[in-house]
Image: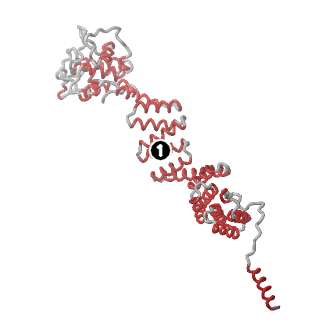
């Protein structure tokens, strides 16, 4: 009997020694990992063994006892496999161990059970940071904030991360651009714009790279976005103007140059604006005017239009008071005919008819040129004396001819030329190309501003 009692007492003692000891839960006054987001317990799991185990595990974690934290959380998850708060807490245990890859696996499993679970999203963001996946971390943090707006501390972290990602992207973009890796630079700038979509300088730099690549459409779009965000960006307005001008959008280009010049007036911008104004004016001229350069012979209407358009400043110095012309009402060149007639450069005949369809011969061109040379002479007496006093010898035009002095002056001024054997060929019809060449030489003699050089070439 005594031996039996001893055996019983021994068994009890042995059983007591083998039973697992209950480890007291630490009282956490200063959390070891205050940046971790504590898992919230859904109402369906309140007051369950799993919830109690998760609470114990979290307390161990925040005391720094990772081994007991893992034991408690693993037991809670084993008891209730769908208990995603415990899975989330195990992710934080791995974060405490600095194992981002293992932590990410726990957070992803938790989210597969409960999408939009804010503590798991926040932990996932932290795990991604340890793996240097900053952009993905930002997305995870923003999702956590959207799921639980009370996580205000994450807002500051997101802003800091965005700035860091932005700086990295900008640096990578500029390095790639300097190295000539244009596609890589474009990708990096595009990534930077995701973080900072309202930064005009990013659009400007991206557009410059696209311009180097030859993608004019993308460059134009991004320069336009730059000036939309920053209306004081004169440089980008210039680039918009250049790109639109290359697309033959003269009006759009001129508007862009005018905006740039209003911000920073320069002679170069003013010259571009004037050139575009002339281009627009030229484009608005009748089709007959544009056809002059290829005409095998020109009419008096053609010559009047050429002089009126390209030598307009010479015609403004003196105008006849009144001119009566009876046959130009239906002529396409009527405005310029009236201008040259009033200036006395091309006059109507004695019957008040201008005869706009009459073919212009070389002697007719010489007479108009001589009258224009007399106007140029007013500001260029040194050269004018040479051509006015010249007496060029022609094989087919005698000095006594009515048009001789005009022909001599035109040739001496190098506005017209002679043919073989010094023949002037006074009756030969003038071609469009010949007339345009003569007008260009008059422009040069008159030192006209480039803005007035706007006729067919």
Residue to which mark 1 is pinned:
208
The residue under the point 65% across, 48% down is 149
Q: Is residue 372 above or below residue 233?
A: above
Give the left or right position of residue 364, taking residue 41 as reference: left
Q: Label 1: few (<14), some or many (≥20) within 10 Å?
A: many
The quarter of the picture where the N terminus appears is bottom right
Q: How many marks?
A: 1
The residue under the point 49% across, 36% down is 237
Asked whether residue 210 appears in the rendered view, the answer is: yes
Q: Helix, strand or loop at disc 1?
A: helix
Which of 138 and 160 lies nearest the eye of the viewer?
Answer: 138
Q: Quadrant of residue 350?
A: top left
Asked whether residue 95 appears in the rendered view, the answer is: no
Q: Is residue 34 above or below residue 452?
A: below
Which of 291 and 106 lies nearest the eye of the viewer?
Answer: 106
The quarter of the picture where the C terminus appears is top left
Which of 141 and 440 lies nearest the eye of the viewer?
Answer: 141
Residue 193 at what x, y percent from top left? 53, 47
Residue 102 at what x, y percent from top left? 59, 66
Indicate how the structure is coloured in the image: secondary structure
Give the left or right position of residue 132, taking residue 290 as reference: right
Give the left or right position of residue 9, taking residue 405 as reference: right
Q: Is residue 96 above or below residue 452?
A: below
**Residue farthest along the front direction in this orientation:** 1
Which of 243 and 142 lies nearest the eye of the viewer?
Answer: 142
Q: Quadrant of residue 435?
A: top left
Residue 249 at what x, y percent from top left? 39, 33
Residue 260 at what x, y percent from top left? 50, 33
């Amino acid at each position: 009997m005594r031996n039996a009692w001893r055996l019983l007492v021994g068994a009890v003692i042995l059983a007591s020694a083998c039973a697992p000891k209950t480890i007291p839960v630490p009282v956490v006054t200063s959390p070891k990992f205050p940046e971790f987001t504590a898992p919230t317990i859904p109402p369906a799991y309140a007051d369950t063994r799993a919830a109690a185990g998760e609470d114990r595990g979290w307390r161990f974690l925040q005391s720094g006892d990772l081994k007991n934290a893992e034991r408690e959380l693993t037991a809670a998850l084993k008891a209730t496999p769908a208990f995603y708060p415990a899975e989330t807490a195990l992710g934080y245990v791995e974060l405490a161990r600095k194992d981002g890859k293992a932590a990410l696996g726990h957070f992803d499993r938790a989210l597969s059970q409960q999408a939009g679970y804010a503590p798991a999203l926040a932990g996932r963001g932290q795990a991604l940071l340890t793996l240097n996946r900053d952009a993905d971390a930002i997305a995870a943090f923003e999702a956590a904030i959207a799921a639980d707006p009370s996580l205000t501390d994450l807002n500051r972290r997101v802003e800091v991360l965005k700035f860091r990602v932005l700086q990295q992207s900008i640096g990578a973009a500029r390095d790639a651009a300097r190295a000539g890796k244009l596609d890589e630079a474009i990708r990096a700038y595009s990534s930077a714009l995701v973080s900072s979509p309202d930064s005009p300088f990013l659009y400007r730099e991206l557009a410059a790279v696209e311009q180097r690549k030859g993608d004019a459409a993308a460059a134009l779009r991004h320069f336009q976005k730059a000036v939309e965000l920053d209306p004081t960006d004169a440089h980008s307005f210039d680039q918009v103007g250049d790109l639109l001008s290359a697309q033959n959008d003269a009006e759009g280009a001129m508007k862009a140059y005018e905006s740039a010049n209003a911000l920073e007036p320069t002679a170069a911008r003013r010259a571009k604006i004037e050139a575009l104004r002339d281009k627009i004016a030229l484009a608005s001229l009748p089709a007959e005017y544009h056809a002059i350069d290829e005409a095998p012979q020109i009419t008096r209407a053609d010559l009047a239009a050429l002089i009126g358009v390209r030598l307009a400043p010479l015609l403004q110095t003196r105008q006849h008071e009144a001119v009566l012309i009876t046959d130009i009402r239906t002529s396409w060149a009527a405005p310029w005919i009236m201008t040259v007639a009033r200036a006395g450069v091309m006059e109507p005949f004695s019957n008040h008819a201008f005869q706009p369809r009459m073919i212009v011969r070389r002697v007719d061109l010489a007479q108009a040129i001589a009258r224009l040379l007399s106007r140029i002479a007013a500001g260029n007496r040194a050269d004018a004396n040479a051509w006015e006093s010249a007496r060029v010898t022609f094989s087919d035009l005698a000095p006594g001819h009515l048009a001789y002095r005009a022909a001599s002056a035109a040739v001496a001024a190098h506005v017209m030329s002679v043919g073989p054997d010094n023949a002037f060929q006074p009756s030969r019809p003038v071609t469009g190309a010949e007339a345009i060449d003569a007008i260009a030489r008059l422009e040069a003699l008159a030192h006209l501003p480039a803005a007035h050089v706007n006729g067919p070439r």
